[in-house]
Amino acid sequence: MVKGHCHPTSTGAAATSHKVLVFMSLHWVLEGRLRKELLCHVRYICHLSSPAVVAAGSRSSRLVFTSCANAAFAKDWPLVWSVMPLLTDGRALPGLLAQQLGMRSPPPLAAVIQHLQMVGADGGEDLCSSWPDSIGSATDATLAVLEHLDREGLSPRQAATVAGASFIPVAHSSRLVPPVQLFVRLGGAALAPFAWEVSGVFVGKLQLLKQLGVKDEPRADDLVQALQRFDSALAGRRMNPNELASCLRLLAYLCSRSSAADASYLAAARRSGTALLVPTAGGILMPASRVVAVGSSGGGVTAARLLGRADPQHMTLAHPQLSDHICRWLGVATLSDVLTEQLDPSLNLTPLPAIDNTSLKNLQQLFASPDFAPS
């Protein structure tokens, strides 16, 4: 926990030297358990910032006062930089004293997991775009984290927590995604931002990644759940053109799955009425059971007439780029399924003597004429 702030001035440097002297004096004067308890609560000057703190001259770096038990060594920065202040090499304490003050290397696993949950909470795009080259790549930092998790080991509950944390760099390290959105093979399918192929640099940690939710290939339920997570992130807003195009590609890929397990899952999802999502004509994701597709069989003048007479408040149209095949697979009803034209029985029919000066008798004579059939 941050206890206060100290700007990197000459006064701050003097405070640092004074603090070290106090530490060393207490270390030799105080004895036993009382000494350790007192020292663990003494605040020390540490860095708190982004990974750029490791790069000299970082403007994002700031100094804070914190207890040593709540700080981490600079060498462990890839593991906890977003949740723990870093004790840089220039302010390092002797190893034995640091251990007595509660500092741990590596830091607690709970802090590492908390860091992974925070670092990519917004997708990590801003972080990746400002990542300093002087400290290595974001991929290198992620490898260090994976190696640490592999050494420490994760319980099933911890693995489930890490599986949903966005910390794996993808798309040339331009964004961070959770392991549950990674797959060993996509077969060339472009499913971003819903599914990504595992980069070759992480193949050596494939066993750990599979423990964290990485699968060999995406199944229908994986794609449906990815679309549901995307819908939650949208929070009801309209998709932009790129998001809409990605959504249409995902649905086309989903409806091309031919395995028995995928077909069975989609059938169950259609019956649920809410699991399958499709884009509307307005670019908003909605359950497939609540939208209506015009359909090729009901297009043209017939569709225009039906749509002109239907109440728009009681009907939402599916996006026109959804094919009939996709609509059938996802359970999207067509106009002919939900709209019919019927004569109002309460209205009396009024026979017309002629239409455009052509009487019924003239039409009957024309149809009976021998010249009508050849024409």
Image (spheres, rainbow, N blue to C red):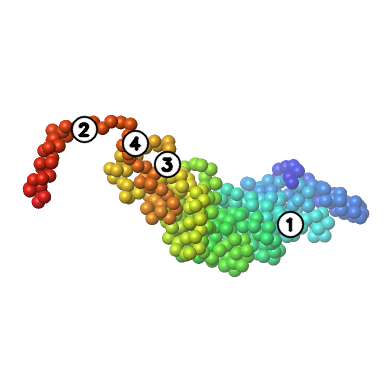
Which residue is located at x 76 percent, y 51 percent? Answer: 70
Q: Kindly tell me whether residue 212 is visible in this rendering.
A: yes
Q: Earlier in the sequence, mark 4 or mark 1?
A: 1
Q: Name the residue under label 3.
A: 316
Q: Where is residue 72 in the image (x, y as percent from the top left)?
A: 73, 54
Disc 4 and disc 1: Cα gap in Å?
66 Å
Amino acid beneath label 2: Pro
Q: Name the residue under label 2.
A: 351
Residue 204 sits above or below residue 241 on the image: below
Q: In this orientation, which residue lies closer to the viewer: 225 or 97?
A: 225
Tell me if 39 is positioned left or right of 296 in this view.
Answer: right
Label ID, residue 128: none
Q: Earlier in the sequence, mark 1 or mark 2?
A: 1
Q: Where is residue 128 in the image (x, y as percent from the top left)?
A: 56, 53
Amino acid beneath label 4: Arg
Q: Name the residue under label 1.
A: 108
Is the Cβ of the residue at disc 4 closer than 8 Å to that at disc 1? no
Q: Position of residue 37 (x, y in %)?
A: 86, 51
Tell me if 195 is positioned left or right of 18 in this view.
Answer: left
Which residue is located at x 62 percent, y 57 percent? Answer: 163
Q: Mark 4 points at which residue?
A: 309
- Give the foreground label among 3 and 2: 2
Which residue is located at x 73 percent, y 49 percent? Answer: 46
Q: Regarding mark 2 in the picture, which secondary structure is present there? A: loop
Q: Residues within 10 Å of mark 2 (few under 14, many from 20)?
A: few
Disc 4 and disc 2: Cα gap in Å?
24 Å
